[in-house]
Amino acid sequence: MKTTRSENNSRELAECRARLAVAEETLRAIRSGEVDTVMVAGKEGSQVFTLEGAEQAYRLLIESMNEGAVTLTSDKTILYANHCFARMIKCPLEQVIGNSFRTFLTPGDLAALKPHLKRAGQTGSKIEVRLKADDGSHTPARISVCPLQKHSSNQAAFGLVVTDMSESKRTEELLRALTHRVVRMQESERGRVALELHDNITQLLIAVIIRSKTLADGFSGHNAGTRKEAMGIGRMLGHAADEVERISRNLRPGVLEHLGLVAVFHASSQEFEKQNGVPVQLTCVTLKTRMPAETELALYRILQEALKNISKHSRAKQVSICLTKKEGIVALTIKDDGIGFEADHFFTKTKGNGGLGLLGMLERAAYVGGAFTIKSARRWGTEIQVSIPLFKKAPSGNQLDQLNQPTKRNYEKNNRATGR
């Protein structure tokens, strides 16, 4: 009995292995394209599944997408493209398939795409490019790369999903224009408030200080306590007047308008050291001519915001500020040795809950055609770098009208000095 059961088990095991071998061979044939039809036996009889029918369903799905779909060989020949992609590049579909994908990219975008194709097999990859349309226009697009299995050079090696970013870019430009308008209005309002503080509040405080001193001087010797109290009130009023003057100066820096960027950098550094007890190493290049008023204001506001962030958050023991100018580009670097933060994820994590200072610095740099980068890590400190091209373009008429009058006169004086 034991021998018979063992033989049965061996026979069943051999049958299972045979079935597994048949299944593996079937899957291999399907993957390699050797099989067009699969017949499956069931309780209701045999059923026939055609791979062509399955492919047709996927083809209908891809054609209904609002995004472009492309498959490429390893040498970037287009094996398949849907109608959405053909509409993006404004080219008939029959002229797209069989063409090289290089045709629809600029040389720079093509060079940028190559490393994404190489590392797509690991994690997938995305890149933003400008597609060259058949009529010579360019369409901003995002390409998502997915590697495909291939067995020969003429089979698909990569699948691309191409997203038209035109509407997104237009929305981005509108938001940026709105941000710039808010910045101009903010500067105009700051100038108005600064003028009100200087011309009204400061003068009123000075008048009260004079009256309090006169009142203190009027007390006789036997009213020494009252006289001392009146003099103390006068000193408090003097401190209040100094604070109002400081706020007014930060709202609209007269030093910037009259003496230039280097002078206001020195003043801001000294004020930061005095208030926080943190030494500042300032290195400024000698500027023989004034920069455009908007560039000077942008650099000053970025420095102002950076120092405020250092004072509030960094716990730094030392700060360095470096202003350089080379080949028509002015560069500002602000570095501290504080606690730092995770800069790579900062903008995405805040989602409006803070971080407006950094976003404001980025937008101010972008407004004058500059670039803004920030490097930071925990216990490493923070480094802000700003680079702005000089005299790239003048503000338009309505932008110039938004500037306060001293800044406008300063900008016009710079134009006369540089012959623009």
Image (cartoon, grey):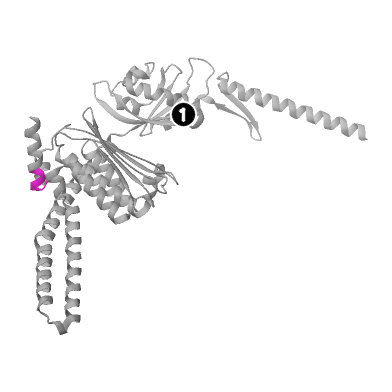
Q: What element carries label 1?
A: strand
Q: Give the range drawn in magenta.
A: 403-408
Q: Residue at x 63, y 24 (%)?
A: 26
Q: In which quarter of the image is residue 168?
A: top left
Give amino acid for label 1. Cys
Q: Quadrant of the N terminus?
A: top right
Q: Pointer 1: what residue? A: 146
Q: Which residue is drawn at 79% across and 30% down?
A: 13
Expressed as whole percent of the image width and height from the top left, the position of residue 350 reads: 37, 50
* Residue 420 in view of the camera: no
Report the side of 232 relative to 8 (left or right): left
Report the side of 148 relative to 317 (left or right): right
Magenta span: chief secondary structure: helix
Q: Which residue is drawn at 10% across and 31% down?
A: 418
Expressed as whole percent of the image width and height from the top left, the position of residue 390 reads: 19, 32
Expressed as whole percent of the image width and height from the top left, the position of residue 365 reads: 25, 40
